[in-house]
Amino acid sequence: MVAMTPSEPDTDASLAAAWRAGDEGAAAEIVRRHAGAVARFLYSAGAGRSDVDDLVQETLFRGFRRLESWRGEASLRSWLCSIAGNLLKDEYRRGKRRQVISIEDDQVVDRSNPHDEAAANESEARLRAGLGTLPRLQREVFLMRAQQECDYGEIATALGTTPGAARVHYHHAVKRLKELMA
Amino acid sequence: MSLCDAVSDRMPLVASGRSEWTAEELAHLASCGECAAEWTLVRAASQMGREMTVDAAAITPMVLERVRVAKAAEQRHRLVTRTAVAGTLAVAAVLLLVMVPRQAGPVPRAPNVAMNQGELQLAELDDAAPAELEMVLVEFDGPVVPASSLDGPDIEGLDVSQVERALRSWEES
């Protein structure tokens, strides 16, 4: 078992190695670091708010089961986001969760500041609706880039494409979203 | 790289609050409508779902328990598969042992037929009387299969219709 020392800033790779060696504390740290980002990704990609918890759990479950296949070429976060994207696709195909990719304005949370927050809510709702109309790859590339701050190389590795193609998908997504939000 | 590309590449970092626009970039955003529109999108995407919270402490044990259960099931499945394969192989081996006839002793050797200078020695003819040897020779000299040929003397006496009948009968046979 690999011992985790709290003073060292562990990389995702070292946490993954520690988990593989049987350290459950490392697994807890991985969840703490990435569960929130995966939840935001899933919600932004069209998952219903009430489904997000279950989908995050399923994403992490699949991730931990396949962690041996993560070789650190893509960041762990982008790798988990790609699993989440596949999960959403599976759910949508199975039709078990019809609310997936169904964007509802009333799902947007109220924030305390009336004017700015109302505008932000409206903007978010429109963006979410717009994302729902994009092809899957464009949507995922856009979210990985704009929301998860992944670079094109990471995105390409996680989604099985090239950095150049990822950049093109991003620009197509931006162009389409601009049209939808104009 | 154009200033538009450079600004675009930095948008996620600035939107997350981990960096700030330079004066030059701010001036570009103010003058370039395309970049300003992209910046609005990136900022909105960056903020989207910020309020979503995940109880990592609660999720972790559930996820790990599921992984444990799944791995145990996988190991059981592997064990069952290996046992089934090993059992099948054992049964096949037993069946082979039972069904293949065993040889009681060494394989009998063929009689040693010596070939010497083109002569074939046949031991069963050693005790044959001259008359018997003569009969054997006559048998050897005769045709193996009684055959008839088109140029045989008997075909010359046939008329056309007889020849045709004969040909038909050969074709049919």
Image (cartoon, coloured by chain):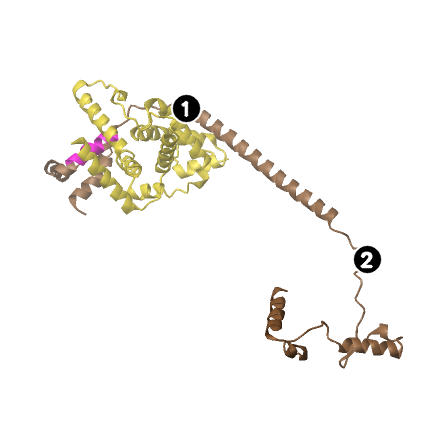
Chain colours: A yellow, B brown
Residue B57 has which mark? 1
Q: Which residue is mark 2?
A: B105
Neighbour class for label 1 at 10 Å: few (<14), some, many (≥20)? few
> Horizontal and vertical percent for residue B153?
67, 80
At horizontal 56% and vertical 35% (from top left) the residue drawn is: B77
Q: Is residue A94 among the parts visible in the rendering? A: yes
Amino acid type, residue under disc 2 in the picture:
Gly
Please identify the quarter of the rendering in which residue A12 is found.
top left
At horizontal 32% and vertical 43% (from top left) the residue drawn is: A156
Residue B44, relative to residue B87: is it above or below?
above
Whether pointer 2 and pointer 1 mark residues with C-beta atoms closer than 8 Å, the reply is no
At horizontal 49% and vertical 36% (from top left) the residue drawn is: A21
* Left or right position of A114 against B118: left
Residue B85, relative to residue B145: is it above or below?
above
* Left or right position of A18 against B23: right
Mark positioned earlier in the residue sequence (2 or 1): 1
Q: CA distance from mark 2 to mark 1?
A: 76 Å
Nearest the viewer among A103 and B44 is: A103
Q: Which residues are magenta?
A: B36-46
Neighbour class for label 2 at 10 Å: few (<14), some, many (≥20)? few
> Horizontal and vertical percent for residue B156?
64, 79
Nearest the viewer among A163 and B16 is: A163
Residue A19 has which mark? none
Indicate the chain on which mark 2 is placed: B
- Secondary structure found at label 1: helix
Based on the picture, tell me whether residue B44 belongs to the magenta stretch: yes
Please identify the quarter of the rendering in which residue B128 is found.
bottom right
> Horizontal and vertical percent for residue B148?
67, 74
Nearest the viewer among A107 and B10 is: A107
Nearest the viewer among B142 and B151 is: B151
Based on the picture, tell me whether residue B74 belongs to the magenta stretch: no
